[in-house]
Image: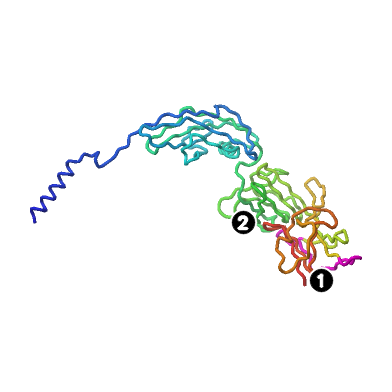
């Protein structure tokens, strides 16, 4: 038995000593050809329009490797005097980086320009290059090209969400109570609220690191703690467009119940906070006509813009002719969907007459709406 064991050990020892290092390990040696950047040509000048669908295509020659392994690319952007050791932006082409072209929107290039220190409405230069790699060998194009970019007004990075905070606001200085603005579209926000004397800021977060913005007339600027436009409590509709860095602050002077049969405002609602106007304990009395009682209504809002001009805005139904609601009527029946100023059309109908009712107009949430509470 001992002899058999010794024999097995000897066999394995022989096999091990007879195997070269290359048998157990694989060393990959390969080469990669230099790539040449093709387009856009160096010193191409672009006037950026981030709101358009404009696309710029970056192209370069394909690299080849000595062992035919696939090549993947990365496109780097840097300041004009940078060396790409810490690029301001890096993009990966389609097909996980295998394509030798890269399509960038003007919005993407506006972000690049911003990171490179080019201010809105200014012109500046960035440079770009391409790195090719198969995971073992890599090569960077030797002919980095320069792009001249003209930025428009507006922000390169729009906040995904926005909140209003400060001593002048309904939420006060406690950031956790900041008031969320409604997002209408990319970079566009709206809020119905009140402002008092004090200061305010618009922030993109309520916790952690935040970006802060203020209004300078009709412009949005980075900053915090601006003085409120109101010397005393005033209700406003605030509209912000970060794509154009513009703002509109519209004073809400009146919200009234428009009774169609009377062709006038019959009750003025009072601002109750949180974007809600309320009329409490008012009678709902239909108007007697020759053909019966009429119960149609909508709302009229009187707004004053930043130049002092006033406008009547009707908050009305999406439907020209409505039936009476009941307990199973969908919530969407009460949504504000049109600004129709005719006497009779696009009105809702009261469900019933009542000695007392509360009427709430709600410019808050995803859908502006109203509520009738019969007592």
Q: Which residue is mark 2?
A: 175
| Quarter of the image that includes the N terminus | bottom left
Image coordinates for residue 94, horizontal then vertical, percent = 50, 40
Residue 249 vs 334, above or below: the answer is above
Give the number of the disc on residue 336: none
Identify the residue at the far front of this view.
Answer: 291
**Which residue is at 41% across, 37% downward?**
70
Q: Provide the residue span drawn in magenta.
A: 271-293
Image coordinates for residue 95, horizontal then vertical, percent = 48, 41
Q: Are marks 1 and 2 in contact (CB under 8 Å)?
A: no
Image coordinates for residue 6, horizontal then vertical, percent = 10, 51
> Residue 372 vs residue 26: left or right?
right
Q: Quadrant of residue 260?
A: bottom right
Give the colour scheme shown: rainbow
> Residue 373 vs residue 173: left or right?
right
Return the residue nearer the eye: 370 or 191. 370
Q: Is residue 150 magenta?
A: no
Q: Quadrant of residue 235?
A: bottom right
Image coordinates for residue 13, horizontal then vertical, percent = 15, 46
Viewer-nearest of labels 1 and 2?
A: 1
Residue 324 vs 341, above or below: the answer is below
Q: Is residue 281 magenta?
A: yes
Disc 1/disc 2 C-alpha distance (Å):
42 Å
Marker count (numbered): 2
> Residue 177 vs residue 260: left or right?
left
Residue 85 vs 204, above or below: the answer is above
Q: Which residue is mark 1?
A: 354
Under circle 1, the secondary element is: strand
Instruction: Count neighbours of disc 1 (C-alpha within 10 A) and say few if under 14, some if 14 to 19, many if 20 or more.
Output: some
**Magenta span: helix, strand or loop, mainly?**
strand
N-term mark: 1 or 2: 2
């Amino acid at each position: 038995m001992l002899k058999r064991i010794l024999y097995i050990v000897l066999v394995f020892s022989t096999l091990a000593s007879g195997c070269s290092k290359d048998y157990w390990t694989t060393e990959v040696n390969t080469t990669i050809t230099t790539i040449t950047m093709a387009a856009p040509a160096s010193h191409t000048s672009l006037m950026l329009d981030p709101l358009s669908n404009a696309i710029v295509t970056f192209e370069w020659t394909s690299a080849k490797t000595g062992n035919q392994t696939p090549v993947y690319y990365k496109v780097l952007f840097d300041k004009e005097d940078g060396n790409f050791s810490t690029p301001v932006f890096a993009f990966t082409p389609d097909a996980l980086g295998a394509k030798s072209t890269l399509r960038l929107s003007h919005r993407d290039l506006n972000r690049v320009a911003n990171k490179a220190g080019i201010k809105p409405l200014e012109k500046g230069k960035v440079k770009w290059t391409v790195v090719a790699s198969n995971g073992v060998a890599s090569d960077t194009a030797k002919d980095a090209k320069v792009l001249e970019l003209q930025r428009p007004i507006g922000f390169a990075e729009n906040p995904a969400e926005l909140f209003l905070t400060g001593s002048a606001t309904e939420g006060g200085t406690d950031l956790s109570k900041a008031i969320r603005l409604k997002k209408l579209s990319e970079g566009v926000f709206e809020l119905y609220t009140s402002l008092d004397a004090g200061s305010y800021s618009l922030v993109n977060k309520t916790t952690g690191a935040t970006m802060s913005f203020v209004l300078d007339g009709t412009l949005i600027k980075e900053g915090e703690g601006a003085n409120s436009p109101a010397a005393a409590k005033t209700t406003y509709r605030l509209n912000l467009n970060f794509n154009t860095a513009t703002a509109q602050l519209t004073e809400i002077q009146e919200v009234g119940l428009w009774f169609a049969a009377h062709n006038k405002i019959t009750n003025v609602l009072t601002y109750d906070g949180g974007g809600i106007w309320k009329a409490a304990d008012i009678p709902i009395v239909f108007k007697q006509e020759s053909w019966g009682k009429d119960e149609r209504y909508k709302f009229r809002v009187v707004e004053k813009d930043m130049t002092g001009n006033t406008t009547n805005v009707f908050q009305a139904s999406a439907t020209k002719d409505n039936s009476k609601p009941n307990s199973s009527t969908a919530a969407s029946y009460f949504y504000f969907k049109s600004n129709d100023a005719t006497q009779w059309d696009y009105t809702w109908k009261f469900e019933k007459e009542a000695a007392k009712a509360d009427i709430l107009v709600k410019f808050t949430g995803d859908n502006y709406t109203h509520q009738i509470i019969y007592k």
